[in-house]
Image (spheres, coloured by chain):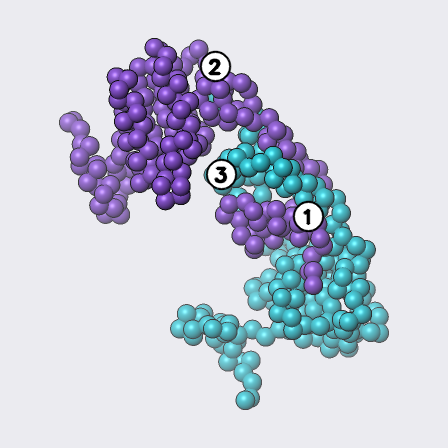
Chain colours: A purple, B cyan
Amino acid sequence: MEYYSRQMQTLMEELGKLPGIGQKTAGRLAYHLMNQPEAAVESLARALTEARKNVRFCRSCCTLTDQEVCPICASQKRDHSQIMVVENPRDLAAYERTGKYNGVYHVLHGVISPALGIGPSDIRLKELMQRLQSDEVKEVIIATGSTLEGETTAMYIYQLIRPTGILTSRIASGVPVGGDLEYIDEITLYRALEGRRAL
Amino acid sequence: MEYYSRQMQTLMEELGKLPGIGQKTAGRLAYHLMNQPEAAVESLARALTEARKNVRFCRSCCTLTDQEVCPICASQKRDHSQIMVVENPRDLAAYERTGKYNGVYHVLHGVISPALGIGPSDIRLKELMQRLQSDEVKEVIIATGSTLEGETTAMYIYQLIRPTGILTSRIASGVPVGGDLEYIDEITLYRALEGRRAL
């Protein structure tokens, strides 16, 4: 027995394919959408199609963009001698929001994860190594996450870059600003101690 | 400064309009979608457009359907003398899943909520009262939620129906099956006591 119309069912199934959207949420979203003006739903559908059609990887840093080269890579105001390696465009956006980084990026689109069968060739490492052949690059800042996979990937990249003699750094790991020590795990506390700096 | 392409930004804004989808989730979903095959994204976009275009309210019970009259209202196998009043099509689907109800439904599309400025004329009550003018209806089962708004709506409907002499009932409120008494709030425990039945 179908409780909803076929189109509702199809929409719920499609929405349910999205990560983190279960059957119940899909139902709630579908119901919400049916109560929106037709134009609003059209506009979401159009945004989906347009984005998927036009968005591609930046030829230089591999982030998602609608141009051949993304605005950051194309900018003359950015320091092209510094490359920050991030896992995905959301991490790039997070660093951009700090307003404190003026170099360029390289987006890996993933991390090495033997558990998930993701090897070095599954992320944009080849593209990074190609960029390092230019004399311009003076430093590679590895800003993958502080997770097991992020650390593994950081070490792997470091080993790859070492022979080139290019300075390679890793963002600091420690107590987050505003973090109360008593709630922070032992490994972070140990890292914060190890990474202490003279005042 | 734009960190993403304009289309990505638009998509994230559109996704962020959905209930329960914040800025971060919208970013994650947009990124996920950009990594899906174009056909998969097209198929979601099509499901949205098609559903919104074709889905309408059942002329009889007001649930969402793609026909003039929904399959339940159109079925000769259902008992059309019993109408269960529910808040929305998801609650209808929940009762259908029990497989234990053979009557028909009436979908209010909301509950009376003075706090949110939702009055009796904002939900599908007029349509319910019109249905009751047929001699066929013998019982109205009010199955709005056990919330303040659900109870208010139930009482309001009961007052409306009383003059017609049609039997009006309310689904039972009590300890959920599998519920451990110690974790259940006092009001539910009191309701369960009040609603006790002889064995």
* Residue at the spot 74% in from the left edge and 68% down from the top edge: B104
Residue at mark 2: A74
- The answer to whether marks 3 and 1 sit on the same chain is no
Q: Where is residue A193 in the image (x, y as percent from the top left)?
A: 17, 36
Please name whichever residue, B135 or A154, is drawn nearer the observer in this view of the structure. A154
> Looking at the rendered structure, which numbered label has been put on residue A34?
1
Say what secondary structure mark 3 lies in.
Answer: helix
Q: What residue type is labelled 1?
A: Met
- Residue drawn 54% across and 33% down? B34
Residue kind at label 3, given as amino acid type: Arg
Determine the chain carrying the residue at label 3.
B
Using the image, determine if residue B8 lies above or below residue A7.
above
Q: Visible in this render: residue A191?
A: yes
Tell me where residue A39 appears, x and y as whole percent.
Answer: 71, 37
Residue B14 x %, y %: 59, 36
- Contact (Cβ within 8 Å) of mark 2 with mark 3: no
Q: Residues within 10 Å of mark 3 (few under 14, many from 20)?
A: some
Instruction: Quickly name the residue at label 3.
Output: B28
Q: Is residue B163 above or below residue B199?
A: above
**Is disc 1 placed on a helix, strand or loop?**
helix
Q: Which mark is residue A11?
A: none
In percent of width and height, residue A34 lies at: 68, 48
Residue A40 makes an appearance in the image: no
Q: Residue at x 75, y 64 (%)?
A: B72
**C-alpha distance separating marks 2 and 3:** 25 Å
